[in-house]
Every structure is written in C-alpha cells, then in structure tokens.
Image: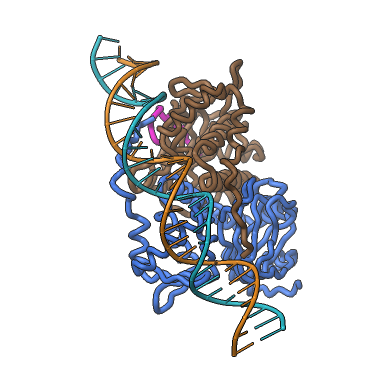
Chain colours: A brown, B blue, C cyan, D orange
Amino acid sequence: MTKLDRSIIHRLPIFSALDDAELDDVLSRATSQHVPKGTAVFQQGDDANAFFVLLHGLLKVVKVTAHGQQVLIRFVNPGDIYGIAKALRREDYPATAIAIVDSVTLAWPSDIWDDFITSHPFLALNVMQVMGDRLQEAHTRVKELSTEEVERRVAHTLLRLIAQSGRDMEQGVMIDFPLTQQDLAQASGTTFHSVSRILSAWESAGIVAIGRRKIIVTDVEGLSHVAEQRQTIKDKRRTPSS
Amino acid sequence: MTKLDRSIIHRLPIFSALDDAELDDVLSRATSQHVPKGTAVFQQGDDANAFFVLLHGLLKVVKVTAHGQQVLIRFVNPGDIYGIAKALRREDYPATAIAIVDSVTLAWPSDIWDDFITSHPFLALNVMQVMGDRLQEAHTRVKELSTEEVERRVAHTLLRLIAQSGRDMEQGVMIDFPLTQQDLAQASGTTFHSVSRILSAWESAGIVAIGRRKIIVTDVEGLSHVAEQRQTIKDKRRTPSS
DNA sequence: CGGTGATTTGAAAATCGTCAAGAACGGTGG
DNA sequence: CCACCGTTCTTGACGATTTTCAAATCACCG
C-alpha cells in the first residue's frame, strides 16, 4: 500500500510550497489506506497516533455529545489535512471522521508532527492558514447559531456546501455527494424534521430540487436571499458599550 | 512607548521557547499602546495591518452581524495573541476587539508575520497550538449551540469563564472582571432577558451570587450539574450510519 | 417483493424570544 | 451630601418558532 506517486501529493495545496526533496521526505513516511464507506478513520476519544490527508473520496467529521447526538463539524475533501490532534497537544481525537463514500487517505505517525512543522517552514504557514480558515468558519457558525433562526441557518449551510462541493449542472448546482437531510440538520443545528419541512417549502418555491440523498439548488440567487433576509423586523436591540 | 523589558515578554507562553537573542529581535519590532476601557483595538472590517499580544487588562472579541447584533467570540487575557488575521491571509479583521478594562497591548506590523513564523520554528508550533485550542473551543460551542438548550449553554459558558478567569474567594469563585449579563448572553447565544431569569433562578438555588456586573459562583459543583444534566429524557434520537 | 432507511406531514407541546414596565444601582455634578 | 440620570437588571405576560411525538409514504437494495 505504499506505492505513492510524487505527482499525486504535489497537487495537494498543503504541500504546494515544498520542493521535490522535501516531498520525497514527506512521502516516504506516509502510508495510505482504503476507507470503505460508512467506516471511521478514527473515533472521538481514540489515541491520536496519526494525522491524515485525504486523497480520494469524502469524509465527515462529527462530534458526539454525551448523549449520543451528533454534530457535524466539517466535511473533508480530497487534499484536506485532518486529524491533526497533535497540533493541539491532544492525546486523543476530539471528533470522529467517517467516510461518506469509499475513500483513500494518507496517514503519518503523530510523533513526526513537530519535526514536520519545524523542518518545513512553509508547511507551517500552510497548516496555519488551514487552521485559520477553519477557525473563521467555526466562528461564522457560532454567529449563525447564535443569531439566526433555523431556516436561515439551513440556507447558509447549503450555500457553504455548494461553494465547497457544488457541481454545476443544467438545472442548477448539485451537491456532489450523497447528503442526508439528517446530515444537513446536524450541520445546521436543528432536527431533520425541520430540514424536511424547509426543503419542501423551498422546493415549492422553486429554489431547490430534492431527491433521495440528493439536493440540487436550482436558484442560488433565491437561496442567498433567504439566507440574508432579516428574520422579521425584530432586530432593534440596543448595543450598549462596555 | 517603546521601553520594553525582556522579562515581561519572556513570561508570555507564546514566546516561551525563544532564546534571548530571538526575544530581543521580536521585541525590537514591537510597539506598545494603551487601550482605554470601552475602546476598540481594531474594528471588524479594518485593514489588518498589525497583530497583537495583550500585556495587561482584558479585551473581548465580538463579531457583529449584518444587523448589528453582537456575538462574543472570546475574551483576550494578558499573554494572549490576537488579531492574527494575517495567518489567514485575510486583508481585514474578521471581528472587533474591545477593551473591557483599561489595557495595554503590544503590536507588530502584519507584514513581518511570515518572517516571524518561518524564522522561529517554535513560535510556529506555539501559535498553532493556540489556534488549535481556539478551534477546539469554537467546535465545542458549535456543539453546545446545536444541542443544548439555553440554561445549559449559559452554565457551560460560565464554567468556561471561571476556568479561564476565575478568582477564588471565601464565598466561591468570582469572575475576575466586570461582566455584563448582556455579555454573558452574547457569549451563550441567547438574550439578556433569559440570562437574567436563569441567574435569578440559580441565585435562589444557591448556586451563584449576583451583583451589578459581577458574578460569583458559590456552588461550582451545582453549576456543573446543571451544565451536564440532560434536558429531560428526550434524547432517544436514532443515529443512522451514513 | 420484502424490508430498511429516508423523507413527509400533521398536531400538540415547550422553550424562548418579544414586548413592556419598573426597580435598583452607581456615578456625577451641584 | 443629595438629587438626578443612565445603565443594568428584574419580572410578568404573550406569542411564535421549533421541537417532539406519531404515523405514513416512498425509494432503493438485495
């Protein structure tokens, strides 16, 4: 399983600034593994003995609450680095990574992380940028969850998804992987019941087309409008200075 | 304003791994500035021309929505690095940093960031750990906002605050800075009305003591209990595999 | 063609936010 | 030292969004 082509990894943004020698060094320590659909690469709470880059397929990262509810943290696309618990000095993974479709991932042992970062300065910058982007997105979600009502949150989630994994089609933009309404609910902080109702309403309004595990946004403009719409006229909250 | 003692900065965790020569280098490029209470160090949307480390005082970082609602992202304690928009390759600050009490901050011009990181490998690791910690916390908040009802969210927020800025007293643990119920609401994703009701109830239950801009947790145990309590018995949601 | 997972919908319940006053507290200036 | 003022906090009542509960339909995979 360790037959890896330098060209494959060279296209990955995270490694883009490395020269050939560095790439070979990096590659030589990696192993690849196949992850069948529905399988976890790692589970929340497991010992964090590796970090990963996804080559093919798609994963979802979920956090499980004390009572078994799942919250979808992020999707992992090919080229993305994930499972970098060691960057936090964590001993265990704070979430679970599950393959949505059959996938292939590269893995490196955790203990080479520090050496990795300190010996390839550009890698550090790239990784930091990735973390920064995620921080941004997480804060945006916090903001949305704090201030927007359900319909608007779902709209924002869907817009983020088509920006990230949308495929253009004749009828509109399609989410390029099997997406359950349950997933969408877990990514938006609501129940799949509410998601179902909302999607039905949007379908009637001609904004989306729904299939089993499939969503096509036929009117991105309209969806954006839903996303930005202030809920009613009830935002007249004062903002006292501290 | 540029009389800086090496010993001051040496105690800051973020610079802990640097030797004296590096410290001098780092320090020589910094300027310090006083930030009166209520003033912003930078505003959301401003050009990100500097990054900072707080020396004294306390800031809050807030994101403002399109409609003027504020969401509290985080408090900045002495020693914390903040405003590192450049790590994200952002041109502007994604949030506003406001002084809660009179504060003093160090500032470095943004354009030395890359040089900073690449020439001090341990600095990169430290910064990455900070970002990782924040990512963790942001995800935790997303999880809480997605699955917990208001009372429990406020409890978790308060617990996080005492862990971060709690001062032990005879009666219990006190939040060591003026904290408005409005702030607490903005940090928990609710309204100050709900916060007020909840705090009143807790005060009756002997869990907290409330003053103007002041909160003392008299029963941390009890608060934790509120925080962990499953809302009722209604968590029997199925968790289908993908 | 059965069965399991996914989705849809209705109706009832519940949590929270909204609206509306007031009260309490602290600081300020005369 | 006291009266005034603005901010912060408190509380009740109401309404609305959203979840919960229940049941039924649908679609696809052996």
The answer to if A214 sits in the magenta stretch is no
Identify the residue at horizontal 54%, vertical 70% (top origin): B177
Q: Is residue A128 above or below residue B163?
A: above
Q: Is residue B110 above or below residue A71?
A: below
Q: Is residue B214 left or right of residue C28?
A: left
Depth check, front residue: D28 or A115: D28
Q: Is residue A50 above or below residue A118?
A: above
Depth check, front residue: B122 or B87: B87
Depth check, front residue: D23 or A86: D23
The region drawn magenta spans A30-40
Q: Is residue A82 left or right of residue B152?
A: right
- x, y percent for residue A143: 56, 47
Q: Is residue B206 left or right of residue A240?
A: left
- x, y percent for residue A139: 56, 48
Identify the residue at horizontal 34%, vertical 35% (top origin): B239
Depth check, front residue: D1 or B99: D1
The quadrant of the image that shows the C terminus of chain A is bottom right
- x, y percent for residue A26: 56, 40
Identify the residue at horizontal 51%, vertical 45% (top origin): A145
Identify the residue at horizontal 56%, vertical 21% (top origin): A206
The quadrant of the image that shows the N terminus of chain A is top left
